[in-house]
């Protein structure tokens, strides 16, 4: 591997680390990490600051995945592009600027997906929205959308299946506390 790959990995991580929710929160006089779930992402921004602020964060979080992944496609083969893309998502989850405490990587993952496979990138939000209609919560909707990706790939674009399996597992991991709460609520109600 040449140095271009490593520069792109570093750039992707740093792009992913830009805390748009934290920046927008400061514009509102709120530290987003001290409210709601504490995550620096779209869902917590909407929960704490409302839809307008959320829609200020969303394009930035998507772009954090799109920009470095798109740049990587100019210089690297598909397998290496997927590694660069993963580092953009990891930058959002573990931002260096915020002591490695970030978001869950969903919007940044969408940005990555829109570059790697635009068809899948359009299907994932549709699955999220349908799931949200039924669940009325972001966490199970995000998990459902993430697990739909490898299934769509298996049917339509098999060469991307492993990458999207990794993203699905990352999504489960970032939502592990939400999963515990959902299981606890279910046990108490049943």
Image (cartoon, rainbow, N blue to C red):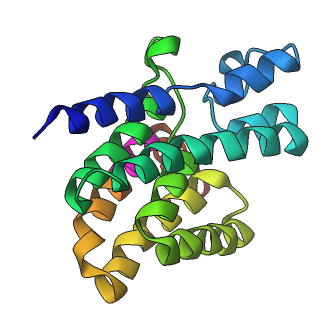
Q: Is residue 172 magenta?
A: yes
Residue 45's place in the image compared with 168, above or below, is: above
Q: Residue at x 58, y 51 (%)?
A: 139
Per the rendered image, the range of residues in magenta is: 170-176
Q: Residue at x 69, y 21 (%)?
A: 22
Q: Left or right: where does residue 157 sit relative to residue 113?
A: left
Q: Residue at x 22, y 59 (%)?
A: 77
- Quadrant containing the C terminus in the rendered view: bottom right
x, y percentage for residue 11? 39, 30
Residue 43's place in the image compared with 14, above or below, is: below
x, y percentage for residue 140? 56, 58
Q: Which is more toward the observer, 41 or 6?
A: 6
Q: Which is more toward the observer, 127 or 58?
A: 58
Q: Left or right: where does residue 6 sit relative to residue 151?
A: left
Q: Is residue 28 magenta?
A: no
Q: Quadrant of residue 56?
A: top right
Q: Looking at the image, can residue 177 be seen?
A: yes
Q: Quadrant of residue 36?
A: top right
Residue 120's place in the image compared with 25, above or below, is: below
Q: Which is more toward the observer, 170 or 66?
A: 66
Q: Looking at the image, can residue 184 be seen?
A: no
Residue 140's place in the image compared with 9, above or below, is: below
Magenta span: helix, strand or loop, mainly?
helix
Q: Which is more toward the observer, 124 or 34?
A: 124
Point out the residue furthest to the bottom here.
Answer: 155
Q: Left or right: where does residue 114 sit relative to residue 168?
A: right
Q: Residue at x 34, y 78 (%)?
A: 153
Q: How many marks?
A: 0
x, y percentage for residue 39? 60, 29
């Amino acid at each position: 591997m040449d140095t271009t790959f490593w520069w792109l990995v570093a750039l992707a991580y740093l792009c992913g680390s830009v805390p748009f929710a934290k920046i927008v929160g400061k514009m509102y006089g709120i530290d987003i990490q001290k409210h709601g779930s504490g995550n620096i992402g779209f869902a917590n921004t909407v929960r704490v600051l409302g839809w307008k602020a959320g829609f200020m964060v969303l394009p930035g979080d998507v772009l954090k995945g799109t920009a470095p992944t798109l740049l990587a496609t100019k210089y690297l083969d598909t397998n290496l592009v997927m590694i660069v893309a993963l580092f953009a998502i990891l930058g959002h989850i573990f931002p260096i600027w915020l002591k490695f405490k970030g978001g869950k990587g969903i919007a940044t993952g969408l940005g990555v997906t829109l570059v790697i496979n635009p068809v899948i990138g359009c299907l994932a939000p549709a699955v999220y929205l349908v799931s949200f209609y039924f669940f009325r919560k972001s966490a199970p909707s995000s998990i459902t959308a993430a697990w739909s990706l490898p299934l769509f790939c298996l049917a339509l674009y098999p060469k991307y299946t492993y990458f999207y399996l990794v993203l699905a597992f990352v999504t489960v991991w970032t939502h592990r506390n939400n999963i515990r709460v959902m299981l606890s609520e279910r046990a108490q109600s049943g």
